[in-house]
Amino acid sequence: MIRVNADKGIRSMSRKAIAIRHLAFEDLGLLEPLLLRHGYRVSYREAGVDDLKRIEQEKPDVLIILGAPISVNDPMRYPFLEDEFRLVSELAGAGTAVLGICLGAQVIARSWGAPVTPMTGKEIGFSSLELTEAGQDSVLAPLADGHDVLHWHGEECALLTMAPSLAETGMCNNQAFQPVPHVLGLQFHLEVTLSSFERWLIGHCAELEAAGLDVSALRERARECLPALEPVASEVFERWLAQIER
């Protein structure tokens, strides 16, 4: 269980954001220009290539752990996951802001002691979220109007003891959670832009074929959903940045 030092906040004078990336095309997307506008120096560390243990020594103000098509329960195959668990525990406990997206959210859940288990099927595609009462009063509030977001996962996080679910769908009842104000887990992908979506269709082609999904239909849904979602997604991230910078 992570113990948070409430006396240590985010340092307003030093802005450094480090993102752990697992696949080249699953990057920060629209979040990167927002971080730059807020004065953060943004850099990536490549999982499986870079030494993730060194991140703690670099003392980032924000750590973002991005998505990947692997299971958070498989550190025997992917030993860098143990480094990610340790980073979340140490940095979040010291007051560093942490954002986890998809696999990153599952890393946060595991670091907080919550299990991550397979769902009844994969949730891939665009659909709306239902914000919970806690979610309506959170940084996710801009999503309350029913915007369709991108889902791409086959596992779900159990509810954290101190963090109620902020959003749910029919397939997954814990789509977002915030155990402490400076730590946010998002099971869905708000960072993806329309201009980058084709890379997802290429990079995940085997998974899409195995799931029997229509690539052309997904592409069309992206054209329908992402242009309207991008400003709303930006507002969610802006709210979280404002929250961690207080």
Image (spheres, grey):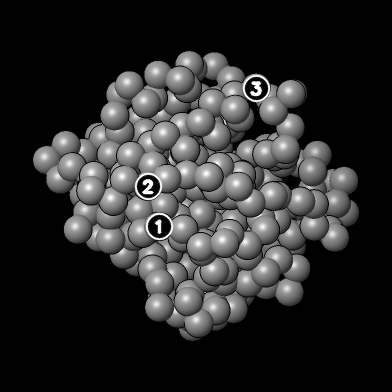
Q: Nearer the viewer, residue 19 or 127?
A: 19
Residue 54, image quadrant: top left
Three-letter residue code for mark 3: Pro
Q: Earlier in the sequence, mark 1 or mark 2?
A: 2
- Position in image of residue 230 (x %, y %): 43, 63
Dividing the picture into quadrants, the one containing residue 203 is top right
Height in image: 23 above or below 237?
above
Q: Which mark is residue 4?
A: 2
On-image quarter of the C terminus = bottom left
Query: Quick one: SS at disc 3?
Result: loop
Residue type indicated by callout 1 = Val
Determine whether, in the image, residue 91 is placed left or right of residue 122: left
Q: Which mark is residue 180?
A: 1
Classify residue 111 by image quadrant. top right
Q: Secondary structure at mark 1?
A: strand
| Residue ID at (33%, 39%) | 94
Q: Residue at x 23, y 48 (%)?
A: 7
